[in-house]
Image: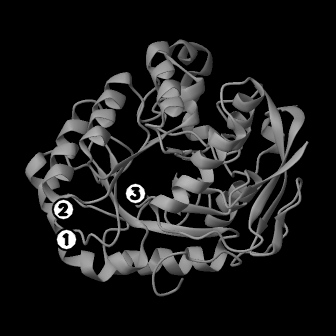
């Protein structure tokens, strides 16, 4: 059964390139995006050089503009060194500000509340703030949302406690939205022994009870977005004595959600909300004409390395049999992916935000 899904957006990816081009490139990871059914992806700021200044932003905009094969946006990053003077010059050309409030990859951690408050106060309210906040740090960020009333998207929420905090915030009327990731929906701490370093991510895998709370939050409407947190690292890096955090996900997010449809855990309409309608609404995007993904809901296959476009060439979901195959991805009337090959050239993708949009 073939169905069309309109304009999929992943607002949480780490595309690498620049000083981390050995891990992946804008071309390879946007190819993974169209192979995963996405019209557009938004890139996080913690790949060096970190996107915390206008000059660093210009470097990234130029590079991704020349090489992306899907449409895109990029985030500015809040820096430990006070970069708030750069915000006015950056805000017009980004999809939002990312604030890392708990330990993660890179050097952009803001660990104290007064510093976070300073960045919240400085960021223009024309674009939202996206936050990495875990456990009780969620309450710290909600205090800032309550103080400044600035739209805030909570990324990769992973525990029942965090869901409780955010459900209460929604009931209070705070301007917050919630994202969760497929790896927290399908994997738990019980999978760590088998997966080894392929299970190392931030936030880490949680308990079965936490996983179940995320599914319930999807069912109840507390969760707005399922986002991949796509974060490729080379096999050599992941198999080293000090493996970095992060797993790829652009090519497996939609198949995993379609698997949930086949299992009766989700409706197709809810999947469309989670990966298309809601991200477009939250980031203020209109779906261009003839921009859609064609999926075969009845096609079953096993996720294998050989079929992946991501440069890292592995997935924590290798060996999992899913139901629902991406047959075509269309962007602005052009067939970008035909189920086997990427058909558009590097540079086809467009910036969805700012003066170059």
Circle 3 residues within 10 Å: few <14, some 14–19, many ≥20: many
Can you see residue 43? no
Along the line of sight, the residue nearer the viewer: 214 or 267 = 267
Q: Residue at x 62, y 77 (%)?
A: 350
Q: Kindly state the secondary structure of the residue where label 1 is placed.
A: helix
Residue 5 image point, x, y percent: 74, 54
**Residue located at (62% from left, 43% from top):** 249
Residue 149 vs 138, above or below: the answer is below
* Mark 1 crowdedness (10 Å alpha carbons): few <14, some 14-19, many ≥20: many
Q: Position of residue 104 (x, y in %)?
A: 36, 42
Q: Earlier in the sequence, mark 2 or mark 1?
A: 1
Residue positioned 50% across, 78% down in the render: 61
Count of numbered circles in the view: 3
Q: Upstream in the sequence, badge 2 or badge 3?
A: 3
Q: Compared to 283, does 327 lie above or below? A: above
Residue 163, how many percent across, how many down? 36, 30
Q: Earlier in the sequence, mark 1 or mark 3?
A: 3
Whether label 1 touches label 3, CB < 8 Å: no
Q: CA distance from mark 2 to mark 3?
A: 17 Å
Which element carries disc 3, helix, strand or loop?
loop
Question: Which residue was labeled with disc 1?
Answer: 84
């Amino acid at each position: 059964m073939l169905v069309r899904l309109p304009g999929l957006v992943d607002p949480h990816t780490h595309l690498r390139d620049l000083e981390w081009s050995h891990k992946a490139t804008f071309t390879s990871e946007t190819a993974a995006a169209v192979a995963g059914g996405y019209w557009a992806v938004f890139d996080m700021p913690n790949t060096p050089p970190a996107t915390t200044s206008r000059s660093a932003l210009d470097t990234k905009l130029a590079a991704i503009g020349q090489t992306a094969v899907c449409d895109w946006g990029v985030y500015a990053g809040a820096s430990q060194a006070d970069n708030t003077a750069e915000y006015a010059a950056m805000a017009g050309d980004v999809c939002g500000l990312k604030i890392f409030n708990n330990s993660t990859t890179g050097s952009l951690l803001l660990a104290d509340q007064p510093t976070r408050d300073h960045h919240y106060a400085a960021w223009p309210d024309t674009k939202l703030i996206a936050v990495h906040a875990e456990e009780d740090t969620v309450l710290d960020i909600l205090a800032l949302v309550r103080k400044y009333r600035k739209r805030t998207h909570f990324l990769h929420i992973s525990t029942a406690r965090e869901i409780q905090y955010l459900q209460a915030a929604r009931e209070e009327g705070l301007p917050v939205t919630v994202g969760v990731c497929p790896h927290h929906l399908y994997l738990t701490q019980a999978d760590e022994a088998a997966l080894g370093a392929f299970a190392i991510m931030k936030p880490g895998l949680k308990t079965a009870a936490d996983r179940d709370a995320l599914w319930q939050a999807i069912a109840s409407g507390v969760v707005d977005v399922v986002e991949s947190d796509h974060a490729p690292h080379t096999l050599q890096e992941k198999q080293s004595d000090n493996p970095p955090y992060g797993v790829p996900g652009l090519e497996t997010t939609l198949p995993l959600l379609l698997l949930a449809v086949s299992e009766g855990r989700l409706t197709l309409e809810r999947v469309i909300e989670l990966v298309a309608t809601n991200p477009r609404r939250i980031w203020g995007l209109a779906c261009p004409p003839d921009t859609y993904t064609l999926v075969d809901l009845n096609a079953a296959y096993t996720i294998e390395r050989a079929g992946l476009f991501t440069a890292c060439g592995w997935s924590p979901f290798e060996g999992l049999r899913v139901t629902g195959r991406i047959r075509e991805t269309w962007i602005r009337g052009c067939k970008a992916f035909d189920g086997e090959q990427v058909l558009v050239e590097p540079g086809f993708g467009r910036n969805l935000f700012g003066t170059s949009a």
